[in-house]
Every structure is written in structure tokens, then in C-alpha cells.
Amino acid sequence: MPELPEVEVSRMGITPHLNQQTIRRFTFRTAKLRWDIPLELKRLEGQVIDAIKRRAKYLLIETAAGSAIVHLGMSGSLRVLDAELPAGKHDHVDLLLTNGKVLRYNDPRRFGAWLYVEPGQSHEVLDKLGPEPLTDDFHAEYMQQRALGKRVAVKQFIMDNKIVVGVGNIYASESLFRARILPTRPAMSLSAEQWQCLVSHIKHTLQTAIEQGGTTLKDFSQADGKPGYFAQELQVYGKAGEACPVCGESIQELKIGQRNTFFCLECQS
């Protein structure tokens, strides 16, 4: 599943091609992805794209007549292509521009989404989201306050989008390893210093992934078709049984909240 860095890389990839361009037409080849595709998206036809923004893992294509909200789901991707290029089997949505280009949404599992929100309004999928991890609103004092009385494993806690958005499974494991914090620790047990360290590593890990183009996963590549490179930097994720890059002990794996989690018992406590 594309995580926050991959979605941000997609945003950066499509922005130069879409910003200040006019939407000529929407083409929907299915009526439903994760949810029904709202026909209100047709209101954006003839509108100039003012900006492409990101909130959590959602992309917002903004116009004066409202915004399209796009979620890549489990396997979705966006490409900017010449409009003459025929659509493939899993190409479900086209946003045709007057410059002859098309933003094409491909989603084999159809678990993504295209939604509509009116100008100046919010959408229910965005209403209960926590702060963005790369902003000043996400800091150690905030996390320690939210963790008061919380016995849930710290890995589950930092992956809760109501607490902070976008810390997906890969980046949670990597950040906890870099902070030397065991992922099974109750969130309430972390000290102020440990929260400071963990928040710093979450920010650094996500920013590094964005800078390097997103993690290379089988279901993701950038808007220009080039894969990301952060996978080269992974220290524990997906490396169960391999030697820890710090101490040499075997990397462990277990499920926390139904998600595979990787860690080193020697380095993390």
C-alpha cells in the first residue's frame, strides 16, 4: 500500500503537469471503487486547477468549483500521459486536460477512491485526522499528552491516524528502530526524552523517504514511472532473521495490530 511518502511523491510528480491547467472532461470506467464515484466531480469540468495538495494519504485537486479527493488505496497509481494513449484494463478514471494530457488513475484492486467536496467545505474522510507529521503541530509534548493512560503498543499508537497521520507500517518499524524503542512498549510508558527522540526520527525517516522518491514496493512507482529508492535505506523492515545492522543479532518479527512488525531485541527496549 502506498504510504505518506509515496503519496507525497505522487503529488510532486503530477503537480507540474496539472497546476493551472483546465479540466476538459472526466471519464469514469467504473461506477464504484472503494465507494461510489460521485457524479458531482463533473462540476469540475471547465475549471482551472488551482493547486494539488495532500492531507494524510489523500490528494486534493482544487478548483474554484470544489475539489477532487483521491486516495490510492491498496494498489492505486496516477500517471500523466498523452491523451491518445489507450486505457488499460485497470485504468478506471481519466482527468483530461485541455493541454492534451490526461491524469490516469489505475487501481487493480479498486480499493482507492475519487470523491468530491464543495468549495470551502471539508469531507468526512478528512474530519478526524490528526496532525501532519512533518509540521510543527506534531511534536513530543503533543504525543506524550495524547499517550497519557494509553496501554496500547506504541507502534499501534503512532500508526493511529487520529493521533498523527501518515506513519504507516514500514516507517513505524523503521522509526522505532532508529529511536531504540521496542514496538510493544505501552505508549504511556515512554518518557519525554523518548518521545522527543521518536518524533525526531519519524520526521527524519519520512522526509528522507520523500527526498529519495518513496519506497520501492511492487504496487508503487512515481508519476513518471520511475521507482522510489528508500528501500535501500531500510534497516529492519522485511529483514526478519537477518543480522541487525547495529549489533549483529537476529532481527525479530511479530504481528502488532495485525501488521508485521520488525525489531531488534538487543537494540530496542
Image (cartoon, rainbow, N blue to C red):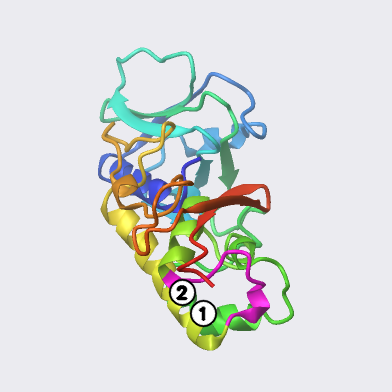
Q: Amino acid at mark 1?
A: Trp
Mark 1–mark 2 CB contact (< 8 Å): yes
Task: For mark 2, give the secondary structure.
Answer: helix
**Quarter of image, res 21:** top left
Q: Which residues, given as a range, are shown in magenta?
A: 179-190
Give x and y (percent) for residue 62. 44, 49
Residue 222 seen in the current view: yes
Task: For mark 1, give the secondary structure.
Answer: helix
Q: Amino acid at mark 2?
A: Val
Residue 101 seen in the current view: no
How many C-alpha atoms fall within 10 Å of the one at disc 1: few (<14), some, or many (≥20)? many
Residue labelled with disc 2: 199
Residue labelled with disc 1: 195
How many C-alpha atoms fall within 10 Å of the one at disc 2: few (<14), some, or many (≥20)? many
Outermost residue on the front side: it is: 249
**Quarter of image, res 105:** top left
